[in-house]
Image (cartoon, coloured by chain):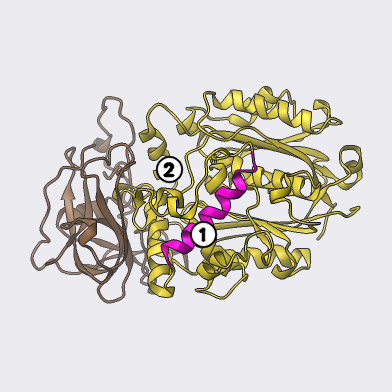
């Protein structure tokens, strides 16, 4: 549950890759999920291939690449990544890497009253970031500077990080 | 409008606030208050029940709340019984669903009730519930809840239009002042002059405590009836003349402009168009001031003023008694508190009572004919609007 954490550096030279969003292959017989003790759902997603058809998003995040899907038929780019295009409803989507940096469009901060499991690091800043190239305006936590030292227009980079239980997620970090 | 005419014929609310009571007990309390407020109503008259409840699973660890509420209120619905969930607009959804059922002929007399229990021994529970309203696996892990989102709306509005903390405080001062005339309001007994509001702690910069509505326990209920049954219960019905909704995104990445709530413009045009009136005909409005900045952006999206002029609209008193129209005479979410499922129904109770001339003089709108009610939900990604007319036979 704790979000601590070692930052992942983007894999050098991580290239763009096209390919189907989902393999479509049935799970192997031995892919039956192992029994686990009872747990409470938390804010972080269940990321494994036995839980989501978007497991590839998290695999790529582990490689340091923030990516999402687009539709090869109508060029529609999605966030969050999807299994079906909302425009033409094609289920044959492809992955592409998102830019690794961007500019703060708006921000605020969580000074108290954080949800359970997200109390670490309060106060922390959150914001909407325009990724380079006008691809996407993405919401995320912003590390690196206290909120009092942030400004609209500040540069940030995408930072994947590991959760203690093996899951992975992403956030932004200011660029000095 | 097709279908039968439908009117509110009465309503009641419980006390709003930090209550030493449970979800079920509030359903009983509002049921008792409703039957006192509508003396001609018998339990067997009510054929349908719609229960607005946003998150009873988290706040009260309870699902299937529609039959629970029916039992608490002494009702045995035999046509439609269901819960409506639309986060902060769950209550208005209950009214809209009851209206649709009656207009279509499925129901003749329905109750719409909203109940929300939000205050628990651990406020972290409530904050966790509020986080679930967002796109939980994508925006949630970043700490997305309502205050930081609406804080970004405020930040952009300040940047783009020069809106000031003083303008936001003008909204909050007005609504808290109206709440001082409403004994059911969470802040009935608390005064919030502008200077005090501007000195309260920052919750999510640039929003201060007085810019934010509260975690509130409360319940509200209204009775809706088909036209032929209306005279049995009320001589001052509030007729539903129009409704509209619009939903244009969920994930925050897809919000587009934070300061142009085009969904509200569309939903209000739909509702006003069905009522065959314009926004200038509206005498008073109960709109969703979950944050002070929300009311400012809503003035603009409703067409009460130009884009960017919402702050001046507030500071010039154009939404106050004696202004262009009266906005949030009940005291708003800021003054009354915001029990999610109950809010939209408490707003409708105010509409009914205003038309009946039954509120204290300091907030009574003079001879009102038209009222507009608005709720947003989530990150202002859904807008729900209803238009009511008073003072007419049917």
The correct choice, above or below, for A87 with respect to B2 in the image is below
Q: Which residue is mark 1?
A: B170
Residue A113 colored in magenta in the image: no
Q: Which residue is mark 2?
A: B130
Q: What chain does badge 1 belong to?
A: B
Q: Is residue B86 visible?
A: no
Residue A153: x and y in percent read: 26, 72
* Most foreground residue, B26 or A170: B26
Mark before the other along the chain sequence, 1 or 2:
2
* Most foreground residue, B144 or A11: B144
**Chain in yellow in the render:** B
Residue B153: x and y in percent read: 42, 62
- Which secondary structure is most common in the magenta stretch? helix
The correct choice, above or below, for A16 with respect to B38 in the image is below
Residue A39, image quadrant? top left
Q: Residue at x 14, y 56 (%)?
A: A63
Residue B168 colored in magenta in the image: yes
State the separation of the CA atoms marked 1 and 2: 26 Å
* Most foreground residue, A119 or B15: B15
Tint applied to chain A in the drawing: brown
- Magenta residue span: B164-182
- Position of A115 with respect to B77 (left or right) is left
Q: What chain does badge 2 belong to?
A: B
Residue B51: x and y in percent read: 64, 36
Residue A62: x and y in percent read: 16, 53
Q: Secondary structure at mark 2?
A: helix
């Amino acid at each position: 549950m704790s979000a601590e954490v070692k930052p992942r550096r983007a894999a050098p030279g991580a290239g763009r890759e096209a390919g189907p969003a989902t393999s479509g292959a049935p799970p192997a017989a031995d892919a039956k999920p192992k029994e686990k003790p009872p747990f409470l759902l938390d804010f972080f997603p269940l990321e494994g291939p036995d839980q989501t058809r978007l497991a590839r998003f998290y695999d790529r995040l582990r490689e340091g690449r923030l990516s999402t899907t687009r539709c090869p038929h109508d060029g529609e780019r999605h966030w969050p990544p999807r299994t079906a295009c909302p425009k033409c409803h094609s289920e044959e989507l492809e992955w592409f890497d998102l830019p690794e940096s961007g500019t703060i469009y708006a921000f605020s901060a969580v000074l108290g009253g954080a949800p359970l499991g997200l109390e670490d690091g309060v106060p922390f800043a959150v914001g909407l970031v325009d990724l380079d190239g006008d691809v996407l305006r993405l919401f995320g936590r912003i590390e690196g500077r206290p909120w009092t030292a942030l400004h609209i227009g500040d540069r940030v980079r995408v930072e994947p990080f590991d959760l203690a239980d093996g899951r992975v997620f992403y956030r932004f970090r200011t660029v000095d | 409008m097709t279908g039968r005419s439908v009117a509110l014929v009465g309503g009641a609310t419980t006390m709003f606030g930090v209550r030493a009571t449970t979800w079920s007990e509030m359903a009983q309390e509002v049921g008792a208050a409703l039957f006192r407020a509508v003396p001609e109503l018998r339990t067997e008259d009510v054929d349908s029940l719609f229960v607005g409840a946003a998150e009873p699973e988290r706040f009260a660890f309870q699902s299937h709340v529609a039959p629970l509420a029916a039992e608490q209120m002494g009702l045995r619905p035999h046509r439609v019984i269901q819960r409506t969930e639309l986060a902060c607009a769950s209550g208005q959804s209950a009214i809209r669903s009851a209206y649709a059922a009656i207009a279509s002929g499925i129901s003749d007399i329905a109750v719409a009730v909203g109940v929300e229990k939000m205050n628990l021994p651990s406020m972290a529970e409530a904050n966790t519930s509020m986080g679930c309203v967002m796109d939980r696996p994508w925006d949630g892990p970043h700490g997305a809840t309502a205050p930081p989102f609406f804080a970004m709306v405020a930040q952009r509005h300040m940047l783009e239009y020069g809106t000031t903390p003083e303008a936001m405080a003008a909204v909050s001062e007005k609504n808290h002042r109206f709440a001082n005339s409403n004994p059911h309001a969470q802040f009935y007994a608390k005064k919030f002059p502008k200077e005090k509001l501007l000195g309260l702690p920052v919750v999510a910069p640039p929003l201060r405590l007085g810019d934010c509505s509260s975690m509130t326990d409360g319940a509200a209920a209204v009775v809706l009836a088909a036209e032929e049954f209306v005279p049995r219960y009320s001589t001052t019905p509030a007729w539903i003349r129009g409704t509209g909704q619009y939903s244009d995104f969920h994930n925050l990445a897809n919000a587009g402009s934070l300061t142009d709530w085009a969904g509200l413009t569309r939903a209000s045009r739909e509702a006003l168009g069905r009522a065959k009136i314009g926004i200038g005909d509206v005498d008073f409005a109960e709109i969703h001031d979950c944050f002070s900045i929300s009311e400012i952006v809503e003035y603009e999206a409703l067409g009460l003023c130009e884009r960017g002029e919402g702050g001046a609209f507030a500071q010039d008193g154009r939404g106050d008694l004696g202004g262009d129209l009266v906005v949030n005479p009940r005291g708003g979410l800021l003054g009354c508190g915001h029990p999610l499922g109950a809010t939209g129904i408490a707003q409708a109770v105010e509409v009914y009572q205003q038309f009946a001339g039954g509120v204290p003089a300091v907030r009574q709108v003079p001879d009102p004919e038209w009222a507009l009610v608005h709720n947003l939900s989530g990150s202002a990604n859904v807008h729900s609007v209803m238009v009511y007319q008073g003072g007419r036979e049917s």
